[in-house]
Image (cartoon, helix red, strand yellow):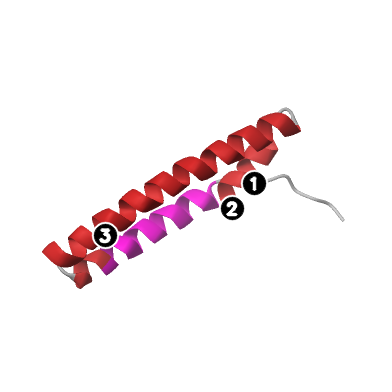
Amino acid sequence: MASNVYVQDISESPDEMRATISTGVSVNHMITILIALFGGWIWQSIGVETLFILSAILGLCNSAYAATIKTKKVII
């Protein structure tokens, strides 16, 4: 969601925005599949505890990055 807001803010036209978001969705899907496979390997090889710790760290990093995205202030 944060990447969509960012793309909407920096894109110069609606066509550019749609192309960028659709490419991003495809790339995110590929990464999600790879992470799921890697997570299954970690679960079987190292243990479930390590998998959940790594997932928590990844979630915190993702949240920290999303918090750095600047948005336009809307005055009501």
Label 2 amino acid? Answer: Met
Quarter of the image for residue 61 reads bottom left
Q: Which mark is residue 5?
A: 1
Can residue 58 be seen here? The reply is yes
The residue lying at 59 percent from left, 40 percent from top is 22
Answer with left or right where residue 55 lies relative to residue 63.
left
Looking at the rendering, in which quadrant would you find the C terminus?
bottom right
Between the residue at mark 3 and the residue at mark 2, the CA separation in whole angstroms equals 23 Å
Q: Position of residue 24 (x, y in %)?
A: 53, 40
Looking at the rendering, the stretch of residues picked out in magenta corresponds to 52-68
CA neighbours of label 3 inside 10 A, class few (<14), some (14 to 19), many (20+): some
Q: Cβ–Cβ below 8 Å for labels 3 and 2?
A: no
What label does residue 1 carry, if any?
Answer: 2
Residue, far bottom: 49
Check residue 38 for magenta coloring: no
Mark 3, residue position: 39
Q: Secondary structure at mark 2?
A: loop
Vertical position of residue 32 compared to residue 49: above or below: above
- Looking at the rendered structure, the kind of residue marked 3 is Gly
